[in-house]
Protein backbone atom coordinates (compact mmCIF):
# COMPACT_ATOMS: atom_id res chain seq x y z
CA UNK A 1 0.00 0.00 0.00
CA UNK A 2 1.53 3.31 -1.05
CA UNK A 3 0.55 6.89 -0.38
CA UNK A 4 2.04 10.28 -1.14
CA UNK A 5 4.54 11.41 1.47
CA UNK A 6 3.52 9.19 4.38
CA UNK A 7 5.03 9.87 7.80
CA UNK A 8 5.21 6.19 8.69
CA UNK A 9 7.22 3.18 7.54
CA UNK A 10 6.36 -0.31 8.77
CA UNK A 11 9.49 -2.47 8.78
CA UNK A 12 9.41 -6.26 9.10
CA UNK A 13 12.37 -8.68 9.18
CA UNK A 14 11.43 -12.19 8.07
CA UNK A 15 13.10 -15.53 7.50
CA UNK A 16 11.63 -18.82 6.29
CA UNK A 17 8.17 -18.28 7.79
CA UNK A 18 6.00 -17.46 4.81
CA UNK A 19 2.78 -18.23 6.65
CA UNK A 20 3.71 -15.80 9.41
CA UNK A 21 4.79 -12.88 7.22
CA UNK A 22 1.73 -13.33 5.00
CA UNK A 23 -0.63 -13.15 8.00
CA UNK A 24 1.31 -10.17 9.37
CA UNK A 25 1.04 -8.14 6.16
CA UNK A 26 -2.62 -9.06 5.74
CA UNK A 27 -3.32 -7.73 9.25
CA UNK A 28 -1.50 -4.50 8.34
CA UNK A 29 -3.52 -4.05 5.16
CA UNK A 30 -6.73 -4.69 7.06
CA UNK A 31 -6.12 -2.66 10.23
CA UNK A 32 -3.72 0.21 9.47
CA UNK A 33 -5.85 3.10 8.26
CA UNK A 34 -3.17 5.79 8.05
CA UNK A 35 -0.71 6.25 5.14
CA UNK A 36 2.45 4.13 5.38
CA UNK A 37 5.32 2.64 3.44
CA UNK A 38 6.03 -1.08 3.80
CA UNK A 39 9.64 -2.29 4.05
CA UNK A 40 10.52 -5.99 4.30
CA UNK A 41 13.96 -7.50 4.87
CA UNK A 42 13.79 -11.16 3.84
CA UNK A 43 16.55 -13.59 4.82
CA UNK A 44 14.77 -16.73 3.60
CA UNK A 45 17.11 -17.45 0.67
CA UNK A 46 20.07 -17.75 3.03
CA UNK A 47 18.46 -20.72 4.75
CA UNK A 48 16.05 -22.50 2.41
CA UNK A 49 14.30 -22.26 -0.94
CA UNK A 50 11.52 -19.63 -0.75
CA UNK A 51 8.02 -20.98 -1.24
CA UNK A 52 6.48 -17.69 -2.32
CA UNK A 53 7.51 -14.34 -3.74
CA UNK A 54 6.27 -11.72 -1.29
CA UNK A 55 6.78 -8.87 -3.73
CA UNK A 56 4.34 -10.56 -6.13
CA UNK A 57 1.70 -11.04 -3.45
CA UNK A 58 1.82 -7.65 -1.73
CA UNK A 59 2.43 -4.01 -2.54
CA UNK A 60 5.78 -3.66 -0.76
CA UNK A 61 7.45 -0.28 -1.19
CA UNK A 62 10.94 -1.64 -0.48
CA UNK A 63 11.70 -5.38 -0.53
CA UNK A 64 15.27 -6.32 0.42
CA UNK A 65 16.37 -9.93 0.01
CA UNK A 66 19.51 -10.83 1.95
CA UNK A 67 21.22 -13.98 0.70
CA UNK A 68 23.81 -14.35 3.47
CA UNK A 69 22.60 -15.56 6.89
CA UNK A 70 22.01 -12.68 9.29
CA UNK A 71 20.25 -12.34 12.63
CA UNK A 72 17.34 -10.16 13.76
CA UNK A 73 19.61 -7.31 14.88
CA UNK A 74 21.30 -7.05 11.49
CA UNK A 75 17.90 -7.20 9.77
CA UNK A 76 16.55 -4.38 11.93
CA UNK A 77 19.70 -2.37 11.23
CA UNK A 78 19.05 -2.69 7.49
CA UNK A 79 15.49 -1.52 8.04
CA UNK A 80 16.59 1.49 10.13
CA UNK A 81 19.17 2.47 7.50
CA UNK A 82 16.61 2.36 4.67
CA UNK A 83 13.88 4.51 6.18
CA UNK A 84 13.07 8.00 4.91
CA UNK A 85 9.95 8.72 6.98
CA UNK A 86 9.64 10.44 10.36
CA UNK A 87 8.30 7.35 12.13
CA UNK A 88 9.16 3.65 11.90
CA UNK A 89 7.07 0.80 13.28
CA UNK A 90 9.04 -2.39 13.76
CA UNK A 91 7.08 -5.63 13.67
CA UNK A 92 8.24 -9.22 13.88
CA UNK A 93 6.90 -11.43 11.13
CA UNK A 94 4.81 -13.36 13.68
CA UNK A 95 2.97 -10.28 14.97
CA UNK A 96 -0.60 -9.42 14.01
CA UNK A 97 -1.80 -5.82 14.06
CA UNK A 98 -5.17 -5.00 15.60
CA UNK A 99 -7.63 -2.34 14.55
CA UNK A 100 -6.65 1.25 15.51
CA UNK A 101 -3.43 0.09 17.18
CA UNK A 102 -1.05 2.00 14.92
CA UNK A 103 -3.24 5.11 14.90
CA UNK A 104 -3.19 5.18 18.72
CA UNK A 105 0.61 4.87 18.80
CA UNK A 106 1.13 7.55 16.17
CA UNK A 107 -1.19 9.94 17.97
CA UNK A 108 0.63 9.28 21.24
CA UNK A 109 4.03 10.21 19.82
CA UNK A 110 2.60 13.27 18.10
CA UNK A 111 1.05 14.44 21.40
CA UNK A 112 4.08 13.55 23.56
CA UNK A 113 7.20 14.97 21.91
CA UNK A 114 9.43 13.93 24.82
CA UNK A 115 8.76 10.24 24.06
CA UNK A 116 10.82 8.65 21.26
CA UNK A 117 9.66 5.02 21.34
CA UNK A 118 6.20 3.68 22.13
CA UNK A 119 5.08 0.08 22.30
CA UNK A 120 2.28 -2.03 23.72
CA UNK A 121 1.53 -5.46 25.14
CA UNK A 122 2.00 -8.78 23.40
CA UNK A 123 -0.80 -11.33 23.69
CA UNK A 124 0.13 -14.97 23.23
CA UNK A 125 -1.87 -18.08 24.14
CA UNK A 126 -3.98 -16.39 26.80
CA UNK A 127 -1.08 -14.49 28.36
CA UNK A 128 0.34 -10.99 28.17
CA UNK A 129 3.87 -9.57 27.99
CA UNK A 130 4.42 -5.88 28.66
CA UNK A 131 7.73 -4.20 29.57
CA UNK A 132 10.94 -4.27 31.58
CA UNK A 133 13.19 -2.01 33.62
CA UNK A 134 16.94 -2.19 34.19
CA UNK A 135 18.51 -2.47 37.62
CA UNK A 136 22.24 -2.15 38.31
CA UNK A 137 24.39 -3.52 41.11
CA UNK A 138 27.45 -5.57 41.98
CA UNK A 139 27.87 -9.28 42.52
CA UNK A 140 31.18 -10.86 43.57
CA UNK A 141 32.92 -7.61 42.64
CA UNK A 142 31.40 -7.51 39.14
CA UNK A 143 29.07 -4.87 37.77
CA UNK A 144 25.75 -6.51 36.93
CA UNK A 145 22.43 -5.59 35.34
CA UNK A 146 19.14 -7.40 35.78
CA UNK A 147 15.60 -6.81 34.61
CA UNK A 148 12.42 -6.38 36.61
CA UNK A 149 8.97 -6.63 35.09
CA UNK A 150 5.70 -4.75 35.31
CA UNK A 151 2.80 -6.91 34.23
CA UNK A 152 0.01 -5.84 31.93
CA UNK A 153 -2.51 -6.75 34.63
CA UNK A 154 -0.83 -4.45 37.16
CA UNK A 155 -0.93 -1.53 34.74
CA UNK A 156 -4.61 -2.09 33.93
CA UNK A 157 -5.55 -2.54 37.58
CA UNK A 158 -3.98 0.85 38.40
CA UNK A 159 -5.77 2.48 35.47
CA UNK A 160 -2.54 3.57 33.81
CA UNK A 161 -2.74 4.95 30.28
CA UNK A 162 1.04 4.63 29.76
CA UNK A 163 4.05 3.16 31.55
CA UNK A 164 7.65 4.31 31.16
CA UNK A 165 10.09 1.45 30.62
CA UNK A 166 13.76 0.87 29.84
CA UNK A 167 12.92 -2.00 27.50
CA UNK A 168 9.86 -2.99 25.47
CA UNK A 169 9.06 -5.45 22.70
CA UNK A 170 10.09 -5.52 19.07
CA UNK A 171 6.69 -4.21 17.94
CA UNK A 172 7.67 -0.61 18.67
CA UNK A 173 7.02 2.72 16.99
CA UNK A 174 10.16 4.88 16.84
CA UNK A 175 11.03 8.41 15.84
CA UNK A 176 13.63 7.76 13.18
CA UNK A 177 15.89 10.58 14.38
CA UNK A 178 16.94 8.32 17.28
CA UNK A 179 19.05 6.33 14.82
CA UNK A 180 21.53 9.19 14.81
CA UNK A 181 22.29 8.17 18.42
CA UNK A 182 21.49 4.47 18.66
CA UNK A 183 21.59 1.55 16.23
CA UNK A 184 21.10 -2.20 16.23
CA UNK A 185 24.42 -4.04 16.63
CA UNK A 186 24.72 -6.64 13.87
CA UNK A 187 27.27 -8.68 15.84
CA UNK A 188 24.45 -10.24 17.89
CA UNK A 189 23.28 -13.41 16.18
CA UNK A 190 20.06 -13.98 18.12
CA UNK A 191 20.02 -13.31 21.87
CA UNK A 192 20.84 -10.03 23.68
CA UNK A 193 20.35 -7.86 20.60
CA UNK A 194 17.34 -5.98 21.99
CA UNK A 195 18.93 -5.83 25.45
CA UNK A 196 21.88 -4.09 23.80
CA UNK A 197 19.68 -1.72 21.80
CA UNK A 198 17.75 -0.62 24.86
CA UNK A 199 20.97 -0.23 26.85
CA UNK A 200 22.01 2.27 24.17
CA UNK A 201 18.66 4.04 24.60
CA UNK A 202 19.17 4.10 28.37
CA UNK A 203 22.62 5.62 27.93
CA UNK A 204 21.26 8.28 25.55
CA UNK A 205 18.27 9.11 27.79
CA UNK A 206 15.80 8.11 25.08
CA UNK A 207 12.34 7.94 26.63
CA UNK A 208 10.39 4.74 26.01
CA UNK A 209 6.78 4.11 26.99
CA UNK A 210 4.23 1.34 26.57
CA UNK A 211 0.46 1.71 26.26
CA UNK A 212 -1.93 -0.80 27.87
CA UNK A 213 -4.50 0.17 25.23
CA UNK A 214 -2.21 -1.21 22.51
CA UNK A 215 -2.03 -4.99 22.00
CA UNK A 216 -0.24 -6.97 19.33
CA UNK A 217 -0.98 -10.65 18.85
CA UNK A 218 2.10 -12.85 18.88
CA UNK A 219 1.68 -16.12 17.01
CA UNK A 220 5.08 -17.81 16.70
CA UNK A 221 5.46 -20.60 14.16
CA UNK A 222 8.38 -22.88 13.38
CA UNK A 223 10.98 -21.87 10.80
CA UNK A 224 11.50 -23.90 7.66
CA UNK A 225 15.09 -25.05 7.87
CA UNK A 226 17.77 -24.00 10.32
CA UNK A 227 18.17 -20.29 11.01
CA UNK A 228 20.33 -18.18 13.32
CA UNK A 229 18.02 -19.26 16.15
CA UNK A 230 19.34 -22.81 15.77
CA UNK A 231 23.01 -21.77 15.55
CA UNK A 232 24.99 -22.82 18.63
CA UNK A 233 26.83 -19.49 18.42
CA UNK A 234 23.62 -17.60 19.21
CA UNK A 235 24.60 -17.56 22.91
CA UNK A 236 27.80 -15.64 22.11
CA UNK A 237 25.67 -12.54 22.53
CA UNK A 238 26.23 -12.56 26.27
CA UNK A 239 29.99 -12.34 25.81
CA UNK A 240 29.58 -9.50 23.29
CA UNK A 241 27.30 -7.69 25.73
CA UNK A 242 29.74 -8.05 28.66
CA UNK A 243 32.72 -6.89 26.59
CA UNK A 244 30.80 -3.93 25.13
CA UNK A 245 29.20 -2.64 28.32
CA UNK A 246 31.52 -3.89 31.06
CA UNK A 247 28.40 -5.22 32.79
CA UNK A 248 27.27 -8.83 33.27
CA UNK A 249 23.55 -9.51 32.67
CA UNK A 250 22.00 -11.83 35.25
CA UNK A 251 18.52 -13.22 35.81
CA UNK A 252 15.72 -13.47 33.27
CA UNK A 253 16.65 -12.31 29.78
CA UNK A 254 13.14 -12.07 28.40
CA UNK A 255 9.75 -11.08 29.74
CA UNK A 256 8.31 -13.24 32.47
CA UNK A 257 4.81 -14.21 31.49
CA UNK A 258 2.12 -14.71 34.10
CA UNK A 259 -1.23 -16.38 33.66
CA UNK A 260 -4.00 -13.79 33.53
CA UNK A 261 -5.74 -13.71 36.94
CA UNK A 262 -9.37 -14.84 36.76
CA UNK A 263 -10.54 -11.52 38.17
CA UNK A 264 -9.27 -9.74 35.02
CA UNK A 265 -9.78 -12.43 32.40
CA UNK A 266 -13.34 -11.47 31.42
CA UNK A 267 -12.58 -7.76 31.52
CA UNK A 268 -9.41 -7.75 29.41
CA UNK A 269 -9.52 -10.97 27.43
CA UNK A 270 -9.04 -10.08 23.74
CA UNK A 271 -10.87 -11.96 21.06
CA UNK A 272 -8.86 -14.40 19.01
CA UNK A 273 -8.07 -13.11 15.53
Image (cartoon, grey):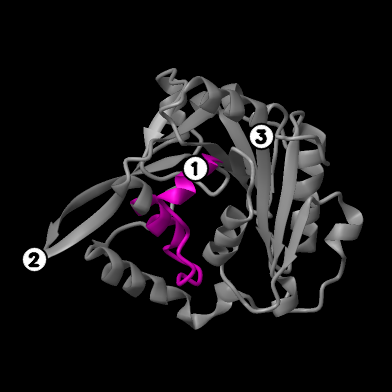
Mark sitting earlier along the chain (2/1):
2
Q: Is residue 53 above or below residue 216?
A: below
Q: Residues within 10 Å of mark 3 (few under 14, many from 20)?
A: some
Residue designated by label 2: 141
Residue 177's disc is: 1
Residue designated by label 3: 7
Q: Is residue 47 visible?
A: no
**Helix, strand, or loop for circle 1?**
helix
**Helix, strand, or loop for circle 3?**
loop
Question: Between marks 2 and 1, how big is the CA–CA gap?
Answer: 38 Å
Q: Is residue 179 visible?
A: yes
Mark sitting earlier along the chain (3/1):
3
Q: Which residues are magenta?
A: 174-199
Question: Between marks 3 and 1, how big is the CA–CA gap?
Answer: 13 Å
Q: Which numbered disc, 2 or 1, marks the residue closer to the eye? A: 1
Would you say residue 170 sits in the magenta stretch?
no
Amino acid sequence: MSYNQPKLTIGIPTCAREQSITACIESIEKNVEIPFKLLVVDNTKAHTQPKINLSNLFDIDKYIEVEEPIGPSASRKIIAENVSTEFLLFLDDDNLVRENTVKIMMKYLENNPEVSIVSGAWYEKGRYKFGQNFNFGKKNGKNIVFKTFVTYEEARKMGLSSVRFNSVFASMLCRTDIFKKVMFDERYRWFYELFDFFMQCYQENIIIESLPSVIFDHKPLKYRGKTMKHDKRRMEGKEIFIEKWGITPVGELGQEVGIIPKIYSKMYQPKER
